[in-house]
Image: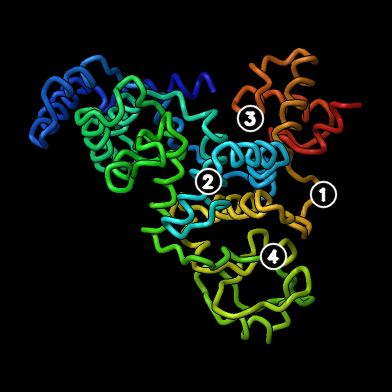
């Protein structure tokens, strides 16, 4: 990975857009002033910024699209997050109840997004937003115009005093706060919580209210579930897909039943098969699509949906994934990292986050023990380490 980073830095340095970073920043300052942002705010925010090649490296890695679905859900909807979530929901019960009442959105869906996005406010991101967004706007990123617009929105947030510059930290891509809003989303949809604040960084009340407002504006139907797990008849080869909505009666006619044996009910839904017809199956409603709009990945929407079920005291996924090597919870990932460190691998802190060092250590360990060296944190690797 070191060679990749150096190579990326060299590539960026050779790029006209990147080599002229200072000129690009000057253009951004002028654009900000044209958009009504004070010259002082623009200069204070942009003058110290230097490009960060790591940002573009991270742009090419999105776990919701590259991670096996059973790994993704196992880490995001694990027992630890459920326990933390129930505690957070108890501590902020009034804010969640008010958000549910005002916006008509399930408090469990709100809490699930809060938990996945920042572990209930514990991890909101370390990247300075202005540096990240300026790097992405002034470098050969995939969507420089988009990030330029988000940078202008971030500067506006600072300029009008909503959130101070030093608190504008978040993901490498510019999302920030306890429920990870992009700056333009904050400007459109952030609302005051029960404490009167719109500060989604420090105020859980503002974060949950603003998230409820996002979901409502995205079309949330009050009282409708996101969906539910179902059983397919043997050898099912019929229609599927989140967007292929059909009546519950039509799904029932194809032999599909709720996993618990109950009636499918009324309305329409699409059949989601995240691991194919041999894995868990779900009938998902329009509200699942609304969750999808928060982060456009079906794996993300499923993880949020399952976590919301568990926070409400209902079971998680009951069907078996089509694998003999399922994913690990965060506690299991930390244990795996601890065991790797005990074997002499430099993996950094055992925090459950599977970064490059951990993947390289896993791959080396796998290769030395007769497994495919894919660097994946799995049950088989953990079991082998525990022997």
Relative placement, left or right, of 331 versus 201 is right
Which one is closest to the eye, mark 4 or mark 2?
A: 2
Say which mark, if any, is on residue 324. Answer: 1
State the CA–CA distance, disc 4 to disc 3. 29 Å
Determine crowd level at label 4: few under 14, some 14-19, many 20+ residues with C-alpha closer than 10 A: many
Check disc 2 and report the residue beneath it.
113
- The image quadrant that residue 345 belongs to is top right
Kindly indicate whether the residue at mark 3 contacts the one at mark 4 (C-beta within 8 angstroms): no
- The image quadrant that residue 350 belongs to is top right
State the CA–CA distance, disc 3 to disc 2. 21 Å
Determine crowd level at label 1: few under 14, some 14-19, many 20+ residues with C-alpha closer than 10 A: few
Relative placement, left or right, of 350 versus 286 is right
Residue placed at 22% from the left, 23% from the top?
A: 21
Of pointers 4 and 2, the one earlier in the residue sequence: 2
Rendering coords of residue 94 (x, y %): 52, 44
Check disc 3 and report the residue beneath it.
354
Secondary structure of residue under mark 3 = loop
Of pointers 3 and 2, the one earlier in the residue sequence: 2
Relative placement, left or right, of 232 versus 48 is right
Q: Quadrant of the N terminus?
A: top right
Q: Nearer the viewer, residue 298 or 157?
A: 157
State the CA–CA distance, disc 4 to disc 1. 21 Å
**Rendered position, 304 above or below 340:** below
Check disc 4 and report the residue beneath it.
229
């Amino acid at each position: 990975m070191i060679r990749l980073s150096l190579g990326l830095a060299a590539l960026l340095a050779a790029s006209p857009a990147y080599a002229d970073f200072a000129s690009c920043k000057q253009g951004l300052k002028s654009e900000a002033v044209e958009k009504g942002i004070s010259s002082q705010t623009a200069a204070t925010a942009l003058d110290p910024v230097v490009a960060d090649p790591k940002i573009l490296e991270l742009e090419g890695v999105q776990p919701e699209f590259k991670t096996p679905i059973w790994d993704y859900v196992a880490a995001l909807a694990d027992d630890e997050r459920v326990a933390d979530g129930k505690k957070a929901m108890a501590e902020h019960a009034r804010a969640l109840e008010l958000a549910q009442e005002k916006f008509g959105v399930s408090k469990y869906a709100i809490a699930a997004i809060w938990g996945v996005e920042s572990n209930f406010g514990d991890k909101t991101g370390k990247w300075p937003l202005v540096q990240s967004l300026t790097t992405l706007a002034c470098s050969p990123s995939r969507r420089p115009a988009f990030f330029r617009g988000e940078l202008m929105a971030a500067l506006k947030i600072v300029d009008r005093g909503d959130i101070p510059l030093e608190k504008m930290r978040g993901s490498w891509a510019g999302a920030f706060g306890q429920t990870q809003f992009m700056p333009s989303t904050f400007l459109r949809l952030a609302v005051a919580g029960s404490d009167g604040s719109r500060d989604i960084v420090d105020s859980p009340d503002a974060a949950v209210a603003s998230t409820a407002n996002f979901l409502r504006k995205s079309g949330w139907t009050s009282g409708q579930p996101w969906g539910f797990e179902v059983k397919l008849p043997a050898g099912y080869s019929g229609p599927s897909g989140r967007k292929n909505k059909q009546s519950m009666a039509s799904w029932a006619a194809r032999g599909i039943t709720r996993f618990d044996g109950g009636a499918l009910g009324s309305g329409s839904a699409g059949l989601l098969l995240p691991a194919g017809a041999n894995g868990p199956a779900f009938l998902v409603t329009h509200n699942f699509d609304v969750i999808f709009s928060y982060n456009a990945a079906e794996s993300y929407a499923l993880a949020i949906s399952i976590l919301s079920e568990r926070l409400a005291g209902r079971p998680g996924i009951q069907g078996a994934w089509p694998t003999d090597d399922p994913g690990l919870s965060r506690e299991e990932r930390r244990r795996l990292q601890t065991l790797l460190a005990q074997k002499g691998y430099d993996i950094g802190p055992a925090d459950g986050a599977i970064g490059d060092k951990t993947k390289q250590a896993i791959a080396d360990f796998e290769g030395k023990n007769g497994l495919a060296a894919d660097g994946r944190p799995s049950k088989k690797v953990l079991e082998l380490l525990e022997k």
